[in-house]
Image (tube, rainbow, N blue to C red):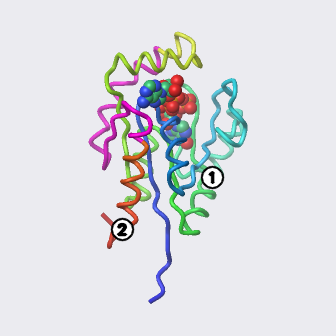
Amino acid sequence: MERENIGNLIVISGPSGVGKGTVCRSLLKKIEVVYSISATTRRKRPGEIQGKDYFYYTREEFEKKINEDAFLEWARVYGNYYGTPIEFVDQILHEGKDCILEIDTQGALQVKEKRPEAIFIFILPPSKEELIRRLTGRGTENEKEINTRIGKLEEELAHLCDYDYKIINDNIEIAAEKIKAIIVAERCRVKKNK
Ligand code: ADP
Ligand code: 5GP
């Protein structure tokens, strides 16, 4: 029996500084999954690379893409636009590969509406104090930007109930192993539609 093999769409969210990017980088070394590169209007951080970390757009360019329906989801997060280019995601899924979206809770809710079969994973910090330490220690945002991100913490945490899985990131390798285990289990599902 021939059945089209569509990959799993995996959504990963969590407060800023919790370690989503770090854990995803570790995950990509452990299992074959494709990371969707988002578009954003936020400024490039030192060390970030166009087309590898994000596609960096001006506000005008981003708004043009919104009007062209080029995003699976998009949102304003911490004062900037962020969005998932839909064409790339669908291409990957139709190749039968699993695709990871690292997006905020507003975007995740949009994906849930459009793609209810997606798998939703929320990453939590071991404590609020540790989250602040990580966000400050990263050294990529100024004090005002850090406060904006911390100010969104409770609102972000309130969305935990919309997710299928929660992972506490107290150890990068263990958190990545747990996400790998979820993906492996999801690949073994008899029925995809939850
Ligand atoms: P996010 O993508 O969620 O905003 P990052 O991946 O940039 O977060 O991580 C924020 C900071 O926390 C980075 O400096 C990273 O090295 C550090 N970090 C991530 N995970 C851990 C961990 N388990 N323990 C200690 N530090 C961590
Ligand atoms: P950062 O500026 O730290 O890279 O990301 C800030 C926030 O934007 C994080 O919560 C991250 O998950 C979210 N984000 C990154 N890409 C996207 C995207 O394509 N869509 C949405 N909705 N959020 C995103």
Residue 159 counted in the magenta span: yes
- For mark 1, does the 10 Å Cα neighbourhood hold few (<14), some (14 to 19), or many (20 or more) residues? some
> Mark 1: which amino acid?
Ala
> Mark 2: which amino acid?
Cys
Dots 1, 2 in contact, CB < 8 A:
no
The residue at the point 32 percent across, 37 percent down is 159
Judging by the rendered image, the residue that carries numbered circle 1 is 70
Q: Nearer the viewer, residue 181 or 16?
A: 181
The residue at the point 44 percent across, 39 percent down is 173
Quadrant of the rendered image containing residue 141? top right
Residues shaded magenta? 147-175
**Among all residues in the image, which is located at the extreme bottom?**
1
Residue 176 visible: yes
Is 144 located above or below residue 22 in the figure?
above
Judging by the rendered image, the residue that carries numbered circle 2 is 188
Which quadrant of the rendered structure holds the C terminus?
bottom left
